[in-house]
Image (cartoon, rainbow, N blue to C red):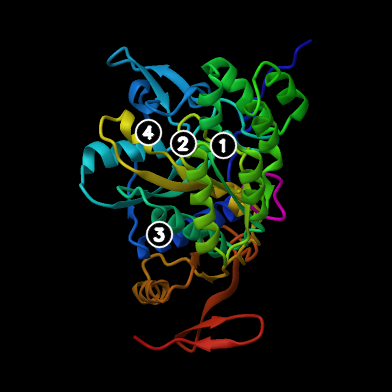
Amino acid sequence: MVKPMRRWLLPEAIEDLLPEEAWQVEILRRNLLDDFRRHGYELVAPPLLEYVESLLTGSGRDMDLRTFKLVDQISGRTMGIRADITPQVARIDAHLLNRPGVTRLCYCGSILHTLPAGLLASREPLQIGAEIYGHAGLEADIEVVRLLARTLQRGGLTASRIDLGHVGVFRALAAAAGIDAELEQDFFAALQTKDVPDLIELVAGIAEPLRSAFLALPQCCGGVDALHRARQFLPDLPEISSALDDLQRLAAALGELPLGFDLSDLRGYNYQNGIVFAAYCSNHPGAIAVGGRYDNVTKAFGRSRAATGFSLDLRELARLVERAARPAGVLAPHIGDDVALRQVVEALRERGEIVVEALPGHGEDWAESACDRRLVRHDGDWHIESSTKTIPLPRH
């Protein structure tokens, strides 16, 4: 006999945030967005769903597969629930703001995935990120990598490694070898997982020196010496030389950060076109934050704009950092029509205190109220009383 499903069960990889974790996420959100603002990034808030033609423009096949779709009952058109906010921000820059110069934008909002990105990942990440539009030089990439490292620090983490790559290297090899789109996806999958046996099979029909170049890509990872190995093993194509020069400049400019290099990391390959990067920390199995250059996305919106940025899942970050101490409050008697007591409570809240009013008929359970003190009256005056001392309040 099949047991009936309990109505309150959530779908797989979808979860509630309970009070302490929800506050942890909210505190991080406020702190990070405030810091973005201090760096000149303006906040935007795109809608949760759009017509798929707009939502998926320039984002690639993988984003299409990750997007939940539904039919709009007003227009009859297919809509999608966003699986990534970055293309939406690119649309805002290209069409709504339409500025000629550099624009810095930031955002934070929920996204939804058809499948979780990893074994323990949520299908409803809370994505926060920052983007720069309108500057094609490496100065913008340097800024966002530094901002990424700072963001992790402000969130309570230190990046153990920030890997840099460049999708232009693989694109140049694929173009030179005449690889078609379908086979290109197979190469992409093999390189992402560093599946060398599979890669050997894929390059069987490719002539030298390109065959050896593809096989060398997984070896081009590690410290800055990985760039030296790449210059030895890879053909002297203009696109490859330019990509390696860019990575060398980044290595020199970001020497204060724990940089690594990985030319087989094609994360975001379907819509990114230049520098890519991923940040890792010691207590997390995968990348905690990712980013890179994606000029092609803005071109798909009809206005070519240089673009680079990064994003991370705020829920994931909140789980990795030490949880902030739960702020304790003051338990106040039921106010009712006591005007004087109401004024005292409001003054305490204005000072930043958490004041919880005890409702009639309930015991004064300090633990559930998250209070470690209470408001009491002595000789006509109100005092805050704790287990160790009594603090008199100023008279009004």
Image quadrant where one finds the C terminus: bottom left
Residue name at image x 33 percent, y 35 percent? 298
Residue type at mark 3? Phe
Residue that label 3 marks:
36
The Cα atoms of the two marked residues, 4 and 1, are separated by: 15 Å
* Comparing labels 3 and 2, the label whose residue is closer to the camera: 2
In the image, 138 versus 231, the foreground residue is: 231
Badge 2: residue crowd in 10 Å (few <14, some 14–19, many ≥20): many
Residue under pointer 4: 297
254 or 87, which lies in front?
254
Residue 112: x, y in percent? 50, 32
Query: Which residue is denoted by mark 2 in the rendering?
Result: 272
Sooner in the amino-acid sequence: mark 1 or mark 2: 1
The tag earlier along the polypeptide, 3 or 4, is: 3
Residue with the mark numbered 1: 267
Label 2 near label 1: C-beta < 8 Å? yes
Q: Which residues are magenta?
A: 280-287
